[in-house]
Amino acid sequence: MPSSAEKLFVVIMAGGSGTRFWPLSRRRRPKQLLPFAAGRSLLRATVERVAPMVPWSRIVVVTVAEVAQAVAAELPELPADNLLVEPVGRDTAACVGAVAWRLAVERPGALMAVLPSDHVIGDAASLRRTLAAGAAAAFAHGALVTLGVRPTRPETGFGYLELGAEVAPIAGQAVRRVARFIEKPDREQAEAFVASGNHLWNAGMFVWAVTAIEQAIRTHLPELAAGLDGLVAAGRGAAERLYPELPRVSIDFGVMEKASNVLALPVEFAWSDIGSWSGLAEVLGGEDGVRIGDIQALDCDGAILVSDGPLVAAIGVPDVVVVATRDAVLVVPKSQAQRVRALVDRLRALGRDDVL
Amino acid sequence: MPSSAEKLFVVIMAGGSGTRFWPLSRRRRPKQLLPFAAGRSLLRATVERVAPMVPWSRIVVVTVAEVAQAVAAELPELPADNLLVEPVGRDTAACVGAVAWRLAVERPGALMAVLPSDHVIGDAASLRRTLAAGAAAAFAHGALVTLGVRPTRPETGFGYLELGAEVAPIAGQAVRRVARFIEKPDREQAEAFVASGNHLWNAGMFVWAVTAIEQAIRTHLPELAAGLDGLVAAGRGAAERLYPELPRVSIDFGVMEKASNVLALPVEFAWSDIGSWSGLAEVLGGEDGVRIGDIQALDCDGAILVSDGPLVAAIGVPDVVVVATRDAVLVVPKSQAQRVRALVDRLRALGRDDVL
């Protein structure tokens, strides 16, 4: 009988289409395709991180039609059958469910690790050890395993895990029950969580048996389960019509917050979801700030200067983000980088599809 | 006998190749060709300002080989023979001298008004009245006439005229002798000049008889006069070889500061030489600052946002200059706009001819 690691599939969710990295990110070039991993895309780096652990035949990438071609081009080694293309994104529960329903038929007994494609992780070997321990824990306990990151600041943009009782360590990796999931807290709560030492950031990385997540979806999201049953019954040709009708809900909110058999593995590696241009500085920046592309800077220590074409010349602006492409340029103080969303909303309202 | 106005030629100096408006200005697209005059170029606006006063046949434009094609394209009405192309720029004395030497042969008795091509002037009719009065004064007194601008701030980047005795007004226009020219003063001097009420900015606009300026050049710049004599004797074909050997000196320093028969006409119209991106705000800016091209701004009142192609999206940067072209983008605080020169020097040292 194969060990849990040999039954492990790694499922990479690459359907995002964030607007926070505009103008570098566009409809057809979302964040996970941006070269924020030492010149490689975040997606490519995500796959390469797990490739030493699982063969390409056990890597599954889920994406949406709009970016499918770019995703496939980024991963030429991926078997065509392992790229699942959603006609439209229906949030993470549908995405996870679609893969689970398929594996349940094709590879009964499989385990799934689910990873976002647009995060930065410091130590790939540590990630692989954690995923292996997660697979063992999911297998041994029939549990839904979630990876949790030790919070370093009272971030109000993340969900948190409140830890419960300890479970026997697996492969030297601490394992805890999850007492509850907490949606994005307010500042005061977040500060208490950081102080408590008993809360982790929900990093959106999971490990479970296909049977366990299928059962959990049937229990907590029966409408989604019925939709997925219908999809399987109708065959792949019907996805275009049926997929958009699946309920739109996250796996965190739809399943993890409601399930009882949830375990947490605190991770030891550095992690960031780089949620905005200013977040990029923490991940990629040296003392000089961030420099990507053709940049000339005078007195701009700390500035985030990015180009995928034009020369960017910056003088005396240490606190700004400048992002330049052939057809659009963004200038914003680092402290206001979140406002890029509002700007993109405005461009959408103005019908500026030429730059979106 | 024709009046002084009917003998007047307007000579427009369009050979400049400043770097202060980089990245919009380039080697082949200097400041005078930039669309800073309500969508028209400064050169075009300069010509259109005097066109109601003199026919195109009496407008002469002097430029350098590198930008000659662009200048000609900007002024299709200009007779080809009225575009004088210097093989290389040799400063303003050579430029003025070359035109004077030619008119002395072709149009003896002519008067010349000499105008820069890259300044902004508020009231074209007032300029024309001043030039007509200047022509009359130059004709009546055999003088070198310079137009002076009432200083509005202790600018240390300009030369100043110190006024002497009053001369009888001409056509309602006050006329003063010039006691002396002062090169760029220090701050203290400049403040004293503004306070005195007896000093004007030297705006680089002149009127004189061809015979008067020819004589002044023969007296004060004999080496230049000899060079120009040689050019005339050798014929136009020799310019490529001989012109670069002319001495490099400004008409202000080489002639005006040394001549005794200099008169000043204080001008009444608004004037700016827009010496930098921040200078542009004073000339073109409303309360919102400057907006040229495809701009989207949130909370950027006062910013100078210019594009000749890409969309520029600026958020929360009220004090900056952003200039975007297809291949280069500049970001600098308005207060440091002068540093663009240092940046261009660096690009030159780096051999970045692709963006210069």
Image: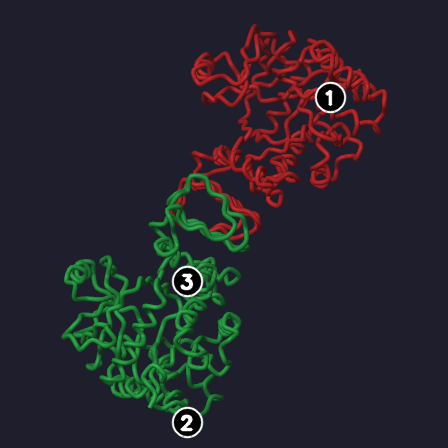
Chain colours: A red, B green
Q: Which amino acid, mark 2?
A: Ala
Please give the chain letter of the residue carrying mark 3.
B
Q: Quadrant of the C terminus of chain A?
A: top right
Rounded to the nearest angstrom, the CA distance separating label 3 from label 2 is 36 Å
- Mark 1 belongs to chain: A
Tell which tag, 1 or 2, sits nearer the viewer: 1
Residue A98 numbered mark, or none: none
- Picture coordinates of residue B68, whole percent (x, y): 49, 74
Q: Secondary structure at mark 2?
A: helix
In the rendered view, would you say B301 is above or below A242?
below
Horizontally, is B215 left or right of B316 in the view?
left
Kindly state the secondary structure of the residue where label 1 is placed. Answer: loop
Q: Is residue A53 above or below residue B339?
A: above
Residue at left 78%, top 34%? A79
Q: Nearer the viewer, mark 3 or mark 1?
A: 1
Q: Which mark is residue B233?
A: 2
Q: Which residue is mark 3?
A: B19
Q: Residue furthest bottom?
A: B233
* Numbered disc 3: secondary structure: loop
Q: CA distance from mark 3 to mark 1?
A: 59 Å
> Are the two marked residues, 3 and 2, in contact with CB atoms closer than 8 angstroms?
no
Which residue ends up furthest to the top in the rendered image? A165
Image quadrant in which the N terminus of chain A is located: top right
Can residue A314 be seen in the rendering of this structure?
no
Instruction: Name the residue tied to disc 1.
Output: A246
Q: Quadrant of residue A187?
A: top left
Q: Position of residue A48 (x, y in %)?
A: 66, 34
